Structures are given as C-alpha cells and as structure tokens.
Amino acid sequence: MTQEYIRDGIYSIDEVFHLLRSSADRNITVNGHLVNRESARYACFKYEGTACCKCGLQGEFFALERQPINTPPNRYHFNLYAHDADGNEVMICKHKTTTGSEPICEKCLEEMRNQHEKRD
C-alpha cells in the first residue's frame, strides 16, 4: 500500500521529536537534507500519540525519506512506521477528523476508504 520512498535513515521516535525541537527555524538539516519541522503530521503524533486510532498498531520508528518524483532531491521528511504481525512495515498516517486529527495506520485508512466507497 505504501508508495515507494527513497530512504536515508531510521530514527527513534524520541530522537525525531528532539530534532524537531532543536531549532526555531522552519527547516532543519538532518543528515545533509532539509526537513520541514512544521508538518502537521509531527504535531499529530506528538499530541495524539503514535498508535493507530483504529487497531492500536504502535508506531516504532521514523524513517527519513523523500518521494522519488516531484520532490527536490534535498527535501526529505520523516515518516512514522510500525511492523505488522508478519514483520512488514506499515506507515502510520495522519487522519483528519471533524475535531482535529489522529494517527491511523495505512491498513485501517485503506479499510475506511473502501467502506466509504461502498456506501457511495
């Protein structure tokens, strides 16, 4: 389900939150790459937690990544991942709700989209 990303490192959750607090600037440099530290996803994970709101799958680490196309080569971001029961990486995303946002794994997000499509 997850699209392919170019990965340049894995970081603990605490390490990323520390990096994001390390500067007042909008962008920080991590491993030679620019990272926008003001992403709404980071705020969601900080304040709402790193577990999926539907199935409880717990985020385990951040990966420093960028999309392979339509992204400047030096512009990266942190994606949050967990491992499912089979050991596969599952991205934890930010899901908008009527009252804010909450973390949701890509599997549960896909299930929600499929249910919504069935109702339409």
Image (cartoon, helix red, strand yellow):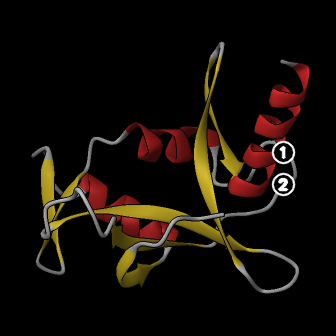
Q: Is residue 119 above or below residue 5?
A: above
In the image, which disc is placed on residue 111?
1
Position of the N terminus, as image quadrant, is bottom right
For the residues labelled 1 and 2, the Cα–Cα distance comes to 15 Å
Q: Residues within 10 Å of mark 2 (few under 14, many from 20)?
A: few
Residue 69 in the image, given as x and y percentages of width and height: 27, 63
* Kind of residue at disc 1: Glu
In terms of image quadrants, where is residue 90? bottom right
The local secondary structure at tag 2 comes to loop
Of residues 29 and 72, the one nearer the viewer is 72
Taking 55 as reference, is 101 above or below it? above
Q: Which x, y percent locates residue 86?
A: 85, 85
Residue that numbered label 2 is attached to: 56
Q: Quadrant of residue 65?
A: bottom left
* Residue 17 screen position, x and y as percent: 39, 59
Nearer to the camera, 38 or 119: 119
The amino acid type found where label 2 is placed reads Gly
State the residue at coordinates (53%, 63%): 80
Instruction: In this rendered view, identify the residue nearer to me: 114 or 10.
Output: 114
